[in-house]
Image (spheres, rainbow, N blue to C red):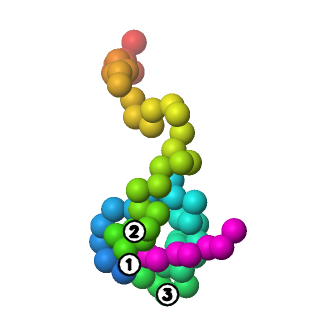
Amino acid sequence: MDMKTNPSPKRGKRNIFCPYYSGCLDTVIRKRWSHWNCAKCEQRANREAEPEIPLNVNYTIAYYELSTKA
């Protein structure tokens, strides 16, 4: 696969589902950028690797505090 990475050295949105994400991450680490985004990448909207299950929780879990005194 021909990897054509194009990260930008500014704060912004990243597409973690992009097939080139790991290559961009390697570039960012090598260049020691503290921030980066996918704004200039042609693959920024590619969501092929996104899982079919939701990545968020739509329910709450009850939380109880128990006394340590008997």
- Res 56 quadrant in image: top left
State the mark number for residue 38.
Answer: 2
**What span is colored magenta in the figure?**
1-7
Residue at the (46%, 63%) spot, across then down: 43
Q: Nearer the viewer, mark 3 or mark 1?
A: 1
Number of dots carrying numbers = 3
In what element is the residue under mark 1? Answer: loop
Q: Quadrant of residue 65?
A: top left
Cβ atoms under marks 2 and 1 closer than 8 Å: yes
Residue at 56% in and 48% down? 49
Which amino acid lies under the numbered mark 3 shown in the image of this protein?
A: Lys
Marks 2 and 3 close (CB-CB < 8 Å): no
Q: Is residue 50 visible?
A: yes
Which callout, 2 or 3, points at the residue further toward the start of the chain? 3
Q: Is residue 6 magenta?
A: yes
Residue at (57, 60) in percent of width and height: 19
Q: Up-down: is 28 above or below 61?
A: below
Residue that carries the numbered disc 3 in the rendered image: 31
Real-space CA distance between mark 2 and mark 3, rounded to the nearest whole angstrom: 16 Å
Q: CA distance from mark 2 to mark 1?
A: 6 Å
Relative to residue 46, is residue 62 drawn left or right?
left
Mark 3 / mark 1, whichever is N-terminal = 1
Q: Position of residue 16 (x, y in %)?
A: 48, 56
